[in-house]
Image: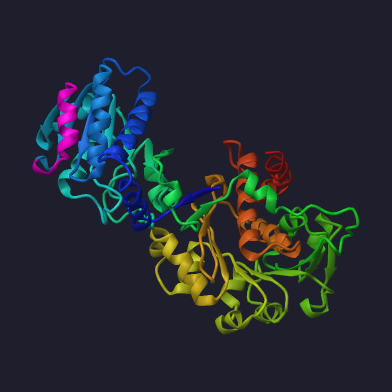
Amino acid sequence: MRTAYGVETVRTAERELMARLPEGALMQRAAAGLAAACADLLGRVYGSRVVLLVGSGDNGGDALYAGARLARRGAGVNAVLLAPERAHAGGLAALRRAGGRTVGAEAAGGLIERADLVVDGIVGIGGKGGLRPEAEALADAAGRARAAVVAVDLPSGVDADTGEVRGAAVRADLTVTFGTHKPGLLIDPAREHAGSVRLIDIGIGPELPAEPELEALQHADVARLLPVPAAESDKYRRGVVGIAAGSARYPGAAVLAVAGALRGGAGAVRYVGPAGQAVIARFPETLVSDRGPEHAGRVQSWVVGPGAGDDAATVAEVLAADVPVLIDADGLRLADASAVRARTAPTLMTPHAGEAAALLGVERSEVEGGRLSAVRELAARYGATVLLKGSTTLVADAGGGPVRVNPTGTSWLATAGSGDVLSGLAGSLLAAGLSTVDAASAAAYLHGLAGRFAADGAPAGAHDVAEEIAAAWRDVVRG
């Protein structure tokens, strides 16, 4: 499992470790890791042209010390000093001793244009808001140059704690981060500025608290969550998921939600709604009823909302059930907020950014620009676990704790019906006994992986994604 910690937590851990180390030792560890990553990216260090963009903070010091190491290996290193009087004195002296040169920002354009590598050490993890004009010009020049761009700890101009980008920011090909991931490296829009991320161990791990701010599950973590039938299991012991979805206008939503549910580990799927004929024609193993949720038979979880149109009565009936309920799509619009908050059984809501914006009463752009705060606010406001879909899928629990960020997926998943498949899959995992947080996290992981398998670099439909869930499941279990 990958974990991420906020700025103040990281700084506290660094202070505690530095108190036991010789002065400057922690920065030297960081600089050594940064220099090694830069050398790997360059391939051939001797004769290469490296430009350091150096601000006044510790990131600038890391860049200067790393530049000194590269200069000693034969690279031509120029440091562009944005604030010469406040540049890290030790790093500056080390670079000059190694043969590196320093220049002002006004002379940087030509150097960046001819560089093989640009190292972004402008702003540290405490930076807020976009870059200042002088730094923005350097970032723009680096973006236009042929050089690879390496960010020190995180790209300058992005918010380390939230992943927000409130102005101009560096776009890196590689970010070399120290000690632990920062939330902004895992959450869009900042994540797309980071490029590939390389974590350098500088020894602060034992100083970090046990509970991180963000978690990103990996194969082994998801494999431990997935249900496996016991020898005495039957279809009812494995869990039964109810799907209340679809309408005369949107029968496909019901079919796709059932498709996801059938591949999600539960023993049986009960469908209620007006799309029964379409469902049974595609999936004859489904238990179909047209008598409403209360008369569908026993279930261990409900999925309500995909393609439901204006059927508020069915949504209300499902919310009254004393089993875990997943609310998606039209169900989010139709559900009474007070009824959601009043539920005593677990609730999972799965909005995309537009639906989340409507629930919060804000513009969609506000959710997309501040995903972490949006998912936390939704979970707290509705007393539910929330899976916020998008380029970064996040899962937050009403009770607090680490937010989970999903590392799988592909942009090809932005296709009609993909969310219906995800809802059915997560609902099935709820019926199999997983908590709302685990069901949402595992479903998002499998769904994202299935999307990669289905697309394989080309467009794929939601039904293709559903067909690949079994392959994704096997891939996770086999490690």
Quarter of the image where one finds residue 51: top left
In terms of secondary structure, what is the magenta stretch mainly?
helix
Q: Residue 303 appears at what percent x and percent y?
A: 69, 68
Quick check: 317 above or below 255? below
Quarter of the image where one finds residue 333: bottom right
Quick check: 79 above or below 427? above
Residue 21 colored magenta?
no
Q: Residue 47 appears at what percent x and percent y?
A: 26, 15
Q: Residue 434 appears at what percent x and percent y?
A: 70, 62
Quadrant position of the C terminus in the picture: top right
Range shown magenta: 85-99
Quick check: 188 above or below 244? above
Using the image as rendered, state which of residue 432 and residue 367 is in the foreground.
Answer: 432
Seen at 74% across and 45% down, the residue is: 470
Seen at 13% across and 30% down, the residue is: 102
Residue 98 colored magenta?
yes
Using the image as rendered, state which of residue 214 and residue 462 is in the foreground.
Answer: 214
Q: Is residue 92 visible?
A: yes
Q: Which colour scheme is used?
A: rainbow
Q: Residue 127 appears at what percent x and percent y?
A: 26, 53
Q: Left of 211 or right of it: where is 256? A: right
Seen at 29% across and 15% down, the residue is: 46
Quick check: 377 above or below 193? below
Q: Left of 181 or right of it: where is 400? A: right
Q: How many labels does the image show?
A: 0
Using the image as rendered, state which of residue 247 and residue 83 is in the foreground.
Answer: 83
Q: Can residue 418 be seen in this view?
A: no
Seen at 35% across and 23% down, the residue is: 42
